[in-house]
Image (cartoon, rainbow, N blue to C red):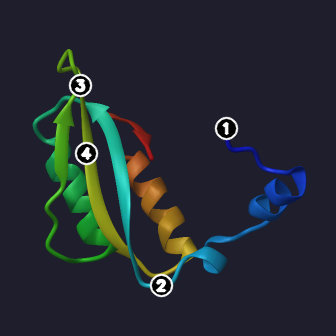
Amino acid sequence: MFTLKPQRIQIMLNTTFDEVMEFPNSCPFKVIGDADDTLIDRVVAVAQQLAPGDYAPTTKASSKGSYYSITIRITVTSKEHIERAYMELAAIEGVKRVL
């Protein structure tokens, strides 16, 4: 089993995106929401507003078909851009979680 020493955990907690990521970066976002045929289009529309490009999200329905899990890669240019992407994706009607 892998364990981290408390000092290592504290260092990790104090690490910022800017220290571990290079920008621009193609960052995956997983959007989980109600199974609605328009959800995918709405996620892509928000991605287009954040960073125009050609998007090919992958989609998976839940076992009961009640929810969709949509994974989309968005090219982000800063920590603030990542935060904005999370906020705008989460604001889409029917979205339950953004990971």
Please state which amino acid type lies under the numbered disc 3. Ser
Task: Quote the CA–CA distance across marks 3 and 4.
Answer: 11 Å
> Helix, strand or loop at disc 1?
loop
Query: What whole-number distance in Å separates the C-alpha atoms at marks 3 and 1?
Result: 31 Å
Q: Quadrant of residue 75?
A: bottom left
**Percent position (x, y) of residue 14?**
79, 65
- Left or right of 63? Residue 14 is right
Q: Viewer-nearest of labels 3 and 1?
A: 1
Among the two numbered marks 3 and 4 on one chain, the one whose residue lies closer to the N terminus: 3
Q: Which mark is residue 70?
A: 4
| Mark 1 neighbour density, 10 Å: few (under 14) some (14–19) many (20 or more) | few
* Residue at left offset 23%, top offset 77%: 52
Q: Nearer the viewer, mark 2 or mark 1?
A: 1
Task: Tell me the residue that label 2 is attached to.
Answer: 23
First of labels 3, 2 by sequence position: 2
Image spot of residue 39 (x, y percent)? 19, 42
The residue drawn where x is 68% and y is 44% is 2
* Mark 4 / mark 2, whichever is N-terminal: 2
- One can see residue 18 in this view: yes
According to the picture, the residue beneath numbered tag 1 turns out to be 1
Give whichever of 71, 90 is nearer the camera.
71
